[in-house]
Amino acid sequence: MTEPRATDQAAGGDAGGYSKDYWDQVFEQLGKRTLFKVALAILAVLYASAIYAPLIANDRPFVLEAINYKEYGQAHRTLYPVTLGLNSLAKKSPEEYLEDRTEGSTQTFDEALSAELAAASGRVELMLSYLPEEAEGRAVLAEYMTKVEAGIAAARARDTETATATMKEVKDVAKRIRAELAPPDLDDPEAEGLELIGQKSYPLWESVSAWEIFFMVLWALVLLWPLWNRAWNALLLRGDRARIRRHRRLKWALVLGLSLLAAGGWKATIDGSLNFAAAPYKAALTSGEIVATRAVFPPVTFGFAETSSGEFFRPPTWSDKAEIDDEGYYVRGPRVPEPDVITGILPDPAPVEVRHGEPDRNAKWRRPLGTDSLGRDFLVRALWGGRISLSVGILSAAILLVIGTVVGAIAGYFGGWVDFLLSRFIELLLCFPVFFLILLVVSVVPPDFVPPIFLIVVVIGLIRWTGVARLARGEFLKLRESEFVIASEALGLSPARTIFRHILPNAMGPVLVSGAFSVAAGILTESGLSFLGFGVNEPIPSWGALVNESRNPEHWWVILFPGLLIFVTVSCYNLVGEALRDAVDPRLKD
Amino acid sequence: MSEANRKALLEVDGLRTYFRSEGEIARAVDGVSYTILEGETLGVVGESGCGKSVTSLSIMRLIPDPPGWIEAGEIRFRGRNLVACSEQEMRQIRGNEIAMIFQEPMTALNPVFTVGSQIIEAVREHQGLDPDAARARAIEMLELVGIPIPEARVDEYPHQLSGGMRQRVMIAMAMSCDPDLLIADEPTTALDVTVQAQILDLIAELQERTGMSVLLITHDLAVVAENAHHVAVMYAGKVVEYAPVEELFARPRHPYTIGLFRSLPDLAKPGERLATIPGIVPSAFAFPSGCRYRTRCPIARDECAAAEPPLAALDQDGVHTVACHLLEEAAKL
Amino acid sequence: MLNYIVRRCLWMIPTLVGITAFIFVVIHLAPGDPATVMVGVASGGEMQGDIDYEARIEKFRAEHGLNKPLWVQYLDFLGPFNLKDSGHEWFGGTGEDNYSGVLALDFGNELQRKQVPVMEELGRRLKVTVPLALVSTLITYLLAIPLGIFSANRQGTLLDGVVTVKLFVLYSIPSFWAGLVLILIFGKTGLDWLPVVGLHSPDAAEMGRGEWIWDLLLHCVLPVATLSYGGLAYLSRQMRVGMIDVIRQDFIRTARAKGLSEKSVVFKHALRNSLIPVITLFASILPILIGGSIIVEYVFSIPGMGGYVYDGLLLRDYNVIMATTTFSAIMTLVGILLSDIAYALVDPRISYD
């Protein structure tokens, strides 16, 4: 098996006739397996849903064009008190100020003036931003600002007299503002008030980090690969096999480059960061503090950390046991409240709060997977939880593949006492229950020291590499005796060069296979640790931690759904590994 | 005994054994006929992949199914058609009436049982001996095949023996039930040259002693020349020439047989380069039309592609049969 | 052979020292210790300047020898001399309690519950975990071997496909989930067939002997199933592959050519050879079971060693962690030794002299 591979490798160099190289053959083999393709498709969807989770389920709107009456009202209400403050400050001489100022303060008179000016101008600017272009109020506000600035300038010049006089005028203007620019009374729909215009903002995008953009772009390019790859091959390369093969690397570089570019651009401009606290938009929109002219929410409007007071451990809403009445009592099933035996009083009602953009209280699709102990939506948490679970698998596998390959390569290539020592060390590591060891390390390091999830990744990587190392060692032992390696040594190439340029590509197949299995094992390990409570920090979800929400069999949805996701993912990875193994090395086929 | 008096022990007649692989059918054996007379040795020669081993496995009915099966033909052993036998009946024949030894003595013995127990097993299966008698028989057989200190060797494991010794154990096992036919499938290929001759001599000696027939499968013409009475030359799933050994070596008539002889070192003149047969054996998935040898034959003509040449007798007594359209031209080669 | 076993047992000593030393260093180097857990500060680092706390922590550390250098603590752990303040006079102790440590078969008392010697508690819990693990292993092997043979002999048929896929699926199920789903199905919320909590019913004390055993058996069904399904899937797959591999070998053809019956070919000639790799897997199944027992005992609320490990880790109880570590390492090493011995018994090519 190694020899044809070796010769293929050599033949790959000449651009003459098209002969299938090793990877062509592997892909051809893989293409024949339906189960492999299904598994890959499921994984692609799972990864897509994890990567795009912020765009699918979020309590922030993509676009919000809204009038924040509360904000405007606050600015309006407090402008007069601020003006009064300015007034009293302007009347004082600097010496008087220093006498009066609060104990411990080091603010100078001028600094105090600047602070008051900023307070006033901030409020005015905010009010201006909500006033339409043609509104009369703008002129009043402008007049106010001019006078304030004049008064402050006078005070700075220590011209207390002028300052006091100007500030008196300012006070009058402020009174006018208080009377004329009051926001409409929200509780009284009939009341005619001031007409305001909406502000446009992008709360969801502002919470997206550059990293997330990188993966979003990357995954879009990968998923669309069949499309643009075909176009590229047909239009640019005109179906020339040799050039297509040479472009393979270029395409991957392009995919990575474009994603990095997008992420870099994002970092430079928006650079959002994820705030774990639930966003206030929906509550404000519901209470009417904000009135939206346009609010575009993601398909699912629940945030992963958004709690709901009336819906603790609510069963999936498509089951009839989940129906809740106006007061927050369950209508059917085991959760129907019963009067207290002694007092005969029902427990306090906890009505379900339906916020802006959410499905109705008893809509079938309101909580398709139920909720957890804090009333957080389980579907959303499962969606976001995939980010942790899926990336832990990949990252830990990457670490263990690198360590395993390097150690195995060294042992297999150099042989002798190096091999002896490394092999004994591997045997020593194999003597220990792996899960136990990982659990031990993860549990003794406190979560505020290193985030447990990073620890899990690193520890899995540091402990599980032995299998890969043995495999790589075997491959290297086999390959280093093969003719093409002997030939390259005869040409005087250095061992390192031989390893990395010649042996490694040939040993890559089996290593890749065990990589797929390692991802599966990594996901299983992480879920087990999270289930025991040694995983992610609250409120970040991961699939294993979701199951840990409740061990009460009555909360079956808590147990069933996240576990099902873990199971499907692990099965898919195992299937992919299986198919890869058969394709990479037909000898190993059952 | 003269040739004519000898009765046929085994007749293979129009045997076709096919294999299925990834939806395609490989015709590994495709119409093979030959006869083994009582007490004599038939040598079957041919390149690897020509179907000679598959034929012998078909005789034993040991073709793994799936992927293989006997498509057509008869195998008559003492007049009884083995193809039609039940598995039960075949088990009575295997090891008892027809025994077989294989190419690789290294892997043909079960590594986890002592050689003695592997012989005892066969004896007890077919002859119903009690354990002690069977053990005595095993030691006797080991002595017969020339293994020193058989009482000790009987309790050793295969990995403790050398290759030649293991092949002797195989022979002892095969001979333990006094078979009428011994199929030896390349029995010496995996052995050292010095050991090869010993093993072949041993088989010949045992044949002399018991009067059994031997089907000797080999790719080595020299082995055939020394040990066989008749020779069947196989090419691409068919017998292309069948003749008594002296006749064949004196007058080879099929271009393939002639090619084989040319590639033997002792027949080439000293200093001359060895002749080779150009090209490769055609794949069993797609044999050429007509004569299967035509793609490599130096004298092939259009007519060779048109029809398959039948295996026809050269003269009245029918001792020498050849499958070739162009016997005249071949004679001039 | 005896020679070999003795040699292997001697080799276990440095391995054990290596493993325990490694774990010892890891748990002691991590920030925070049992003393800080005791006073309710998780990570040691940032404490209020409370004099009382510090005094209590100091007292606790002194009492348990946590203020000594790490290597002294490790030697104290190894024993047999007690190196703590209350220890042997040779090492500056008061001589109250001369011997402790692994060599004195004394892992000290639990740090948070001072009256309970770890060794006693561990012994109680091993009586639960070890039988569960052994029964699971036995069931795994008893089911996996016939399943593997069965599916290998029907290789390529639909039945084989179904069996292989089913086993494959089992292999991908997280064990805690398997346990919980079994509880869902067979517990009160589902079919209500089996008890799902602990190993005994609350009223087990009043039961007769037969009833008590039956109660125990019922309680064991789900934990044993959860412990063994993964190994079952893995082993029967290996068995199938091994069997298919062996069936293709030349010596199987030889056996057939001898006229042996198919039964004797499969169960005598093929089985013994294909058992070899499966037997060596015993060494890797045992550590998996020990790791798995942590989860299974947590899911089914079983008071075994796995649960002890969990509690020990939560409370940062060094004595509990070290004791459980040492025992699981010993069990793993013994498992490896046993599988090597079994290997030698079935494969005559292996010689250990």
Image: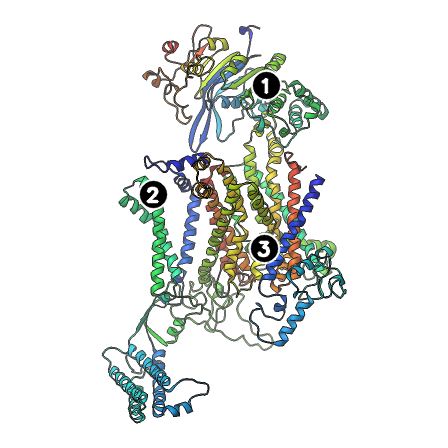
Query: Mark number for residue A437?
Result: 3
> C87 left or right of C340?
right
Q: Pick the residue in front: A204 or A344.
A: A204
In x, y percent, where is residue A522?
51, 53
Element under disc 2: helix
Letter of the chain that mark 2 sits on in the rendering: A
In x, y percent, where is residue C181?
55, 56
Letter of the chain that mark 3 sits on in the rendering: A
Vertical comparison of B144 with C209: above or below: above
Between the residue at mark 2 and the residue at mark 1, the CA separation in whole angstroms equals 57 Å
Between the residue at mark 1 and the residue at mark 3, the CA separation in whole angstroms equals 59 Å
Vertical comparison of C150 with C58: above or below: above
Residue at x 52%, y 76% (from the top left corner) = A348
What is the number of callouts on the image? 3
The answer to whether dots 2 and 1 both sit on one chain is no
In x, y percent, where is residue B210?
63, 14
Element under disc 3: helix
